Image (cartoon, rainbow, N blue to C red):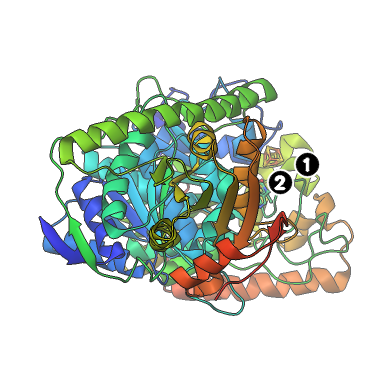
Amino acid sequence: MKAMITGNQAAAMAARDARVDVVAAYPITPSTPVVEEIARMVETGEMDAKLILVESEHSAMAACIGASASGSRTFTATSSHGLAYMHELLHYAVNARTPVVMAVANRAIGPGWNIWADLSDAMSQRDTGWIQLYCSSNQEIYDTILMAYRVAENRGVMLPAMVCYDGFVLSHTAMPVETGVEGFLDGYESPWNLNFDEPETFGNILPPDYYMELRKDIVESHRRAVKIMREVEEEFEELTGRRTPLLVEEYRTDGASTVLVTLGAIASEAKIVVDEMRRNGERAGLLRIKSFRPFPYDEVTRALEGAERVVVIDRSVSPGAEGQLFSEVKSALYSSKSHPDVLGRVAGLGGRDVTSKAIERAVRLGGREEWIMEVIS
Amino acid sequence: MKISAIPDREFLLPGNAACHGCGSSMCLRTVLKALGKNTVLVVPASCTSVYQGMFPGSAIDVPVFNTVFAASASTASGIAASLERKGIDATVVVWAGDGGTYDIGLQALSAAAERNKDMIYICYNNEMYSNTGVQKSGATPYGAWTTTTWSGKKEHRKDVAELMVAQDVAYVATASAGYLTDLYRKVRKARKKEGFRYIEILTPCPPGWKYPMDRTVEMGRLVVETGMWILYEYENGEIRLTGMSRAIAGGRRKLRDVEEYLLPQGRFAHLSREDIDVIRSYVEKRWEKLVKLAGGVHAAPAEFYV
Ligand SMILES: Cc1ncc(C[n+]2csc(CCOP(=O)(O)OP(=O)(O)O)c2C)c(N)n1
Ligand code: SF4
């Protein structure tokens, strides 16, 4: 079925179609409508799930972890301060190996109160061990949530996943979205089940040897996730005819000498710039990073092999360092044979509009400066 | 009730890592006997997360889910929803310290109580953070020494059991490590009820309170006999004193002076006369309040669950 829906509606419908068992959530702009829509669907019987209306995001994630650890498929949604408030439990979900899937409508963090798009909220959580997938259209939000369950719940992975999308730019903008995917996602068969005859303890003291083993396995699970994601991409395409990338999307990178690298909604705008540059005879291309964690090193180095110039645009910044994506791209290229110039740009913080003109300026900005903090508007 | 009515089966296994004379572990042993096999225990950061032992072992013979300090009631809410969804019949029980209940976990507790989720929340109250080395909590009484109140706490404790009464949950009960059959009976009763239930147990802690480890039961009795801790139940909109507190209110036992309780404990060793008077008048005020809430002095026969 095709309908004009917002990114938040797409997220809610994906949770419904993933047949989640338990949703625990707390409202925050701009992800609030996800919770409202799920509440409406649960009340009208359109969606068959237990909804727990908790009193904070900390509790939302705790409830999801509890539900997941006792065998249920779980979902939640949040943004900004809500995500920050979950921090303790984001780590917990990873070590507990609970494949919770969460929609994150990305928003800046205060003060001053800023409800607009900015990826700092999710980027601040990058080292928690969550899989992080950044979407650039509403169709992608819907597809990615379904696909995220397949990856997260894979026995070789068992990690939680956040599906991120720029607040308002996608969360509140209606676009045509095809919903309803048959035969892609089964009901959840959890490896965690309560056994009262041979009871197990979850999360008691873990001495150094075991703790190190656990963390090692989590690192390896991320590596395995890359492969699983390639497979899930293929299978999803076969089933729906839609190529919804999980790792990266390459756009006109063949023979490109200048490659733009970015993620999220900025990537859609960047395509317009690439087209324009190509029309002018410039060999431009775009590499969109979909999966920030696990970071797809192979895909990135391959896509940037022939480039002379790489321009990375971040919608977040790590004060005292640089844009997070910029750091990752440079790090990926260090071990590859090609050493293009890599330029970092920061744009669109706190919802600053990132127009195609702005992106063009980011590309044209001269110099070989490793890192230019330029809010392009 | 006879002590022989309590089942032999142990769910808190011998060889666990609790201190000798630990009131908390003693009560958990009784609580688990009352709950039986089909129980899921949720444990936040606390002494219990330590004395249950290290992976791959466990000293607790029911499924345990350890959670973060602030989130026991919400973790339990998630587990309860999941069990309901899967049609699994088990009792979800939080076992949390007073730190995890009075302070950092209060928000989640109060919200779960409001949602009336089907669970039993048990707070074992040793009146401080024992696990991190005896710091004050919201349950620490006036005057008590802790490592963050060196010259004695300057404020009175708050009372979460009374907050739960105010939230009108399905069942509230207080208990003490001095009266294990009373505790057993209250947990059995809670188990049969539906909705949100709250039990708070006063559990003396020898290293934190600074008394010899063989006097835990005695402390658990003195605290009730002096009125420093009051045993009661709340259900169907009514408070009812139980056990020793009921006997005292009924005039069959005399309320003992608080000094008898304070003096054997090192944590109160520095108290001045004035401090003891402050505690005494606090106890009198609370005792009168509770007796009044329980409908005055009872002539009813004494029930001794001792
Ligand atoms: C967010 C957070 N802050 C602090 C701690 C450290 N911590 C662990 S247990 C504890 C005290 C627990 O006290 P209580 O709940 O009374 O249980 P008890 O130790 O007395 O058994 C503290 C402060 C923690 N684990 N998490
Ligand atoms: S410190 Fe106190 S509460 Fe903790 S295990 Fe020892 S006796 Fe029990």
Looking at the rendered structure, which numbered label has been put on residue A170?
Answer: none
Q: CA distance from mark 2 to mark 1?
A: 9 Å
Circles 2 and 1 in contact, beta carbons < 8 Å? yes
Mark identifier at residue B207: 1
Q: From the image, state whether disc 2 or disc 1 is nearer to you.
A: 2
- Viewer-nearest residue: A150 or A95: A150
Asked whether mark 1 lies closer than 8 Å to ligand 2, one says yes
Is residue B16 among what the camera can see?
A: no
State left or right for residue B203 relative to residue A28: right
**Residue topped by disc 2:** B130
Q: Is residue A275 left or right of residue B65?
A: left
Q: Residues within 10 Å of mark 1 (few under 14, many from 20)?
A: some
Badge 1 element:
helix
Q: Position of residue A184 (x, y in %)?
A: 19, 36
Dot 2: chain letter: B
Residue A100 in picture, x, y percent from top left: 39, 44
